[in-house]
Image (cartoon, coloured by chain):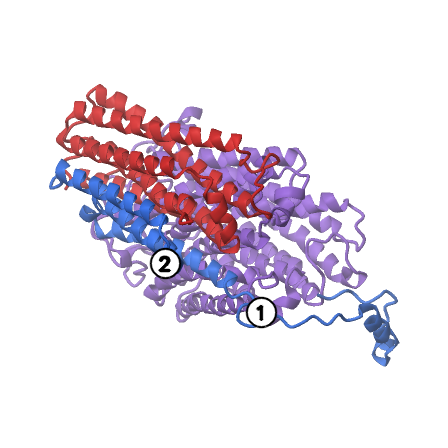
């Protein structure tokens, strides 16, 4: 016999202070969810501005300087304030302790601190936006950013510097938690692959983020104090900035994609009702991507004065880093084989991910070849490549994860028909937006220009139309998720009939996750065992 | 090693887990600090390779006496910190407090000497920026050297100041008898941080002060 | 750590002071190419003493040791690959002398060539990288 309203982490207390001073990793995840969503739509607004300008060849919507600020702020907000925190800080924070049978992360106060640091860094950046933004490109290349730009570089640099510490705090928390807080019997190879992905991501956060922190601090010193570090006029080397910048920023893109891959592993297994194929290979490939990802940063610098021989090394290792990614794609596909596949919304996003990530990854291989990169560097080919990975990959994984775990996090179900439609809209909108960009880039349209040669207009119009469809696809989930909070049906502990510790507790979970430490932990994804019964239909 | 290190926080299963988690957390943090300073070391190394003779000439303007003195002072503060941690294991609050005070004093001496050195640089027009003046050599090397000198020692000094604030907090707590055989983990963690700051200086000193002095 | 005595710490302290004196003294001597490596070796010995004894890494778990070593290793990667660029620029093969091409003449020739007549666009061809 249960109580009338069993206490869960959402309703256990409802004062503002109980939310803003919470130490519960689940509440902190919700705080992140709200802030990350706000920044996503801010970054999206800049994208709208870009696509509006690019409808016509001449630069007639904005001045050049203004357009520079549009794409720069789009990049900065999306990369640092959405893509890097999204899955780790929202889904990782919520699920990691539960998936390993712990009551919370290792350092709950550091967890809360990381959210406040994120918000403070965000406040600096929003202030910078209000004061006119930055026009250097999200890559802050020197000496433009350190000496010549007249925009709010200092303020934005401080904002990014501060937010970097949020990333470090989260990563540190996750690494220590995975090492030290696993329930008895939860060995490394019984952990869900999502946890492996979060662990690998957190290692990258720990090792890479400090380097961009110091690099940005140097740019700040150069700008504010006149220290000539990257300015050639003062003896500095701009390529040194690029080395230091990309030492973090390349692994950063793996911070953005690895968690998504972890989500996909969970979804594919659940909606094929089958044990994931090649568990150890997928786990090892997460680690391999994390490690190899630190050895390839020079592939962003092929057309600088970087030595050709160093370029060859970077190019070769960039080819190697595609291998673990491919292993994952093959293993997911093998998981589907002879599985009992159901096309619920999370699975639709997972399918979208696999296809679009494959295209993005393959085009990355084209870019890794120096001879090709010389021609397509700084064209829309690169833009299309990374949007296929970041949007077609990372964001699809994020949305898939949100749709998969929303019933767990909120205890509510969203309307399945509408969510499937929405997934379709996202897929169509995405491809219409970014596939033409491959073609435009290959034919020579440069990036970061607001005027272009008329022969590219057809492709750009297609892209902008696609962007409006994509925007609809992102607004719909916002609407029906909010709707579901009030009007959605109750989800129950396991609406999908999936395996995993998170599905054995109530939805929403109680404040301490588990009443007692879980025992009898078995291998993950043991779908052969009929312990959980048939998934509840909720059409 | 750990004797009971309580009190037990609610999300931990046992005291051993709690203790090991704190230790491992600090080591992970120090890992990030290695990379944080490492970026500066990388930049410095690149420019030293490019502008070696300018760096030699610029480094001669650093006072090797004060540099060596500061190194010795910081190593001594590491010693007193280690002794404070040792006293922590014995639960001897008075000894903890006294050794931490010594650490604080030695750290302050270090910072005082650095202040003196910085002021000296200001008078010699060696602060990078519009007032920089290095007549012995043409070129940008010396200004780059001093940019890195101030960034690296400045960042190190910031870490020391943060450490000193933490030391003050622990001194007050030890004075109030807060620590015991069962509870001295914070002192150990503080010790790890302080020793790391010492480690950074152990590398900063030869990099900056001892480039080449055999003329 | 309960095995460490204050005497151990004083011994390490003395060793560190002696090494500091040695490294300062060595700076005044000329070892040619070995100046820098010697300074680095001495600094590394001092660092190992601090980490192993003062920071009690010798009593810590293997995991903490791996993380300590990992940080150093990752810094080594950053240094190694960055220097792989700087040290191999134009030192192995000197750059070929540049032949300046008259761009406008090339474009003029292209516009007059039979291939160009198949272009329907009246605008000048887009600049390719």
The residue lying furthest to the top in this view is B176
A117 or A134, which is in the foreground? A134
Asked whether residue C15 appears in the rendered view, the answer is yes
Q: Chain of mark 2?
A: C
Asked whether residue B17 appears in the rendered view, the answer is no
Q: To which residue does mark 2 refer?
A: C34
How packed mark 2 is, by other alpha carbons closer than 10 Å (few <14, some 14-19, many 20 or more), is: few
Residue B157 % position (x, y): 41, 34
Residue A461 % position (x, y): 74, 57
Determine which of the numbered discs, if any, sits on residue A522 in the image: none
- On the rendered structure, is A313 left or right of A49? left
Residue at figure coordinates x 26%, y 51% from the top left: C65
What letter labels the chain drawn in purple? Answer: A
Residue B138 % position (x, y): 60, 47
Q: Colour of chain C?
A: blue
A482 or C35, which is in the foreground? C35
Residue at figure coordinates x 64%, y 42% from the top left: A147
Dot 2: what SS? helix
Dot 1: what SS? helix
- On the rendered structure, is A97 left or right of A139? left
Marks 2 and 1 sit apart, C-alpha to C-alpha, by 37 Å
Q: Is residue C127 above or below residue A469?
A: below
How packed mark 1 is, by other alpha carbons closer than 10 Å (few <14, some 14-19, many 20 or more), is: many
Q: Chain of mark 1?
A: A
Residue at figure coordinates x 27%, y 59% from the top left: A523
Task: Name the mark nearer the viewer: 2 or 1.
Answer: 2
Location of the N terminus of chain A (image quadrant)? top left
What letter labels the chain drawn in red? Answer: B
Q: To which residue does mark 1 refer?
A: A370
């Amino acid at each position: 016999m249960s109580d009338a309203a069993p206490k869960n982490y959402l309703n256990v207390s409802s004062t503002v202070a109980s939310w803003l001073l919470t130490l519960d990793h689940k509440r902190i995840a919700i705080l992140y969810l709200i802030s990350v969503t706000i920044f996503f739509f801010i970054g999206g607004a800049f994208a709208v501005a870009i696509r509006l300008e690019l409808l016509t060849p001449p630069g007639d919507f904005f001045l050049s300087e203004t357009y520079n600020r549009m794409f720069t702020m789009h990049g900065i907000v999306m990369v640092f304030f959405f893509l890097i925190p999204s899955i780790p800080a929202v889904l990782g924070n919520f699920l990691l302790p539960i998936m390993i049978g712990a009551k919370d992360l290792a350092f709950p106060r550091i967890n809360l601190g990381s959210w406040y640091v994120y918000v403070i860094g965000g406040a600096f950046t929003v202030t910078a936006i209000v004061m006119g933004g930055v026009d250097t490109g999200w890559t802050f290349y020197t000496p433009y950013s350190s000496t010549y730009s007249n925009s709010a570089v200092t303020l934005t640099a401080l904002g990014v510097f501060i937010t970097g510490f949020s990333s470090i705090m989260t990563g540190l928390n996750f690494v220590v938690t995975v090492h030290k807080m696993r329930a008895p019997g939860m060995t490394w190879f019984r952990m869900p692959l999502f946890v492996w992905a979060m662990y690998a991501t957190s290692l990258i956060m720990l090792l890479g983020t400090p380097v961009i922190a110091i690099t940005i601090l140097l740019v700040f010193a150069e700008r504010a104090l006149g220290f000539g570090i990257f300015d050639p006029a003062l003896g500095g080397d701009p390529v040194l900035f690029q080395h230091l910048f990309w030492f973090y920023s390349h692994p950063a893109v793996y911070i953005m994609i690895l968690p998504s891959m972890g989500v996909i592993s969970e979804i594919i297994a659940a909606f094929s009702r089958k044990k994931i194929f090649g568990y150890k290979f997928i786990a090892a490939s997460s680690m391999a991507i994390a490690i190899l990802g630190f050895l390839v940063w020079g592939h962003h610098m092929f057309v600088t004065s970087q030595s050709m021989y160093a370029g060859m090394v970077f190019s070769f290792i960039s080819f190697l880093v595609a291998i673990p990614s491919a292993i994952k794609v093959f293993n997911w596909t093998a998981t589907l084989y002879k599985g009992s596949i159901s096309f619920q919304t999370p699975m639709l996003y997972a399918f979208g991910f696999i296809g679009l990530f494959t295209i993005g990854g393959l085009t990355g291989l084209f870019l890794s070849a120096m001879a090709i990169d010389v021609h397509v560097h700084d064209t829309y080919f690169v833009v299309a490549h990374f949007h296929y990975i970041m949007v077609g990959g990372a964001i699809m994984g994020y949305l898939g994860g949100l749709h998969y775990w929303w019933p767990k996090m909120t205890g509510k179900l969203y309307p399945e028909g509408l969510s499937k439609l929405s997934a379709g809209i996202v897929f169509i909108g995405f491809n219409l937006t970014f596939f033409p960009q491959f073609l435009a880039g290959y034919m020579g349209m440069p990036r970061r220009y607001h005027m272009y040669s008329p022969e590219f207009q057809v492709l750009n119009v297609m892209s902008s139309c696609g962007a409006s469809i994509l925007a609809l696809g992102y607004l719909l989930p916002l609407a029906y998720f909010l709707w579901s909070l009030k009007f959605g049906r109750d989800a129950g502990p396991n609406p999908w009939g999936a395996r995993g510790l998170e599905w054995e507790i109530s939805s929403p979970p109680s404040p301490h996750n588990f009443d007692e430490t879980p025992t009898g932990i078995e291998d993950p994804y043991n779908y052969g065992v009929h312990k959980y019964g048939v998934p509840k239909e909720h059409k | 090693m750990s004797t009971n290190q309580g009190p037990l926080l609610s999300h931990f299963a046992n005291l051993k887990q709690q203790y090991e988690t704190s230790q491992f957390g600090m080591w992970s943090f120090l890992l990030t600090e290695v990379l944080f300073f490492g970026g500066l070391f990388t930049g410095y190394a690149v420019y030293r390779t490019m502008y070696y003779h300018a760096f030699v000439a610029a480094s001669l303007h650093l006072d090797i006496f004060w540099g060596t003195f500061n190194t010795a002072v910081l190593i001594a503060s590491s010693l007193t910190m280690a002794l404070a941690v040792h006293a922590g294991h014995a639960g001897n609050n008075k000894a903890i407090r006294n050794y931490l005070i010594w650490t604080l004093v030695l750290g302050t001496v270090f910072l005082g000497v650095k202040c003196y050195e910085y002021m000296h640089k200001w008078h010699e027009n060696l602060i990078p920026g519009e007032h920089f003046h290095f007549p012995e050599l043409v070129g940008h090397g010396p200004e780059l050297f001093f940019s890195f000198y101030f960034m690296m020692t400045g960042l190190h000094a910031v870490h020391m100041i943060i450490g000193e604030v933490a030391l003050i907090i622990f001194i007050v707590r030890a004075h109030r008898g807060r620590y015991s055989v069962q509870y001295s983990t914070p002192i150990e963690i503080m010790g790890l941080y302080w020793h790391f700051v010492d480690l950074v200086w152990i590398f900063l000193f030869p990099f900056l002060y001892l480039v080449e002095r055999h003329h | 750590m309960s095995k460490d005595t204050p005497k151990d710490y004083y011994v390490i302290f003395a060793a560190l002071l002696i090494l500091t004196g040695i490294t300062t003294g060595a700076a005044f001597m000329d070892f040619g190419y070995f100046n820098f490596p010697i300074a680095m070796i001495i600094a590394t010995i001092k660092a190992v003493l601090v980490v192993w004894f003062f920071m009690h890494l010798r009593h810590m778990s293997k995991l903490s040791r791996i993380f300590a070593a990992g940080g150093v290793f990752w810094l080594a990667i950053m240094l190694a690959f960055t220097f792989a660029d700087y040290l191999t620029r134009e030192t192995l093969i000197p750059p070929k002398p540049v032949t300046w091409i008259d761009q406008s003449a090339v474009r003029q020739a292209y516009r007059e060539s039979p291939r160009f007549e198949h272009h329907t666009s009246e605008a000048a061809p887009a600049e390719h990288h």
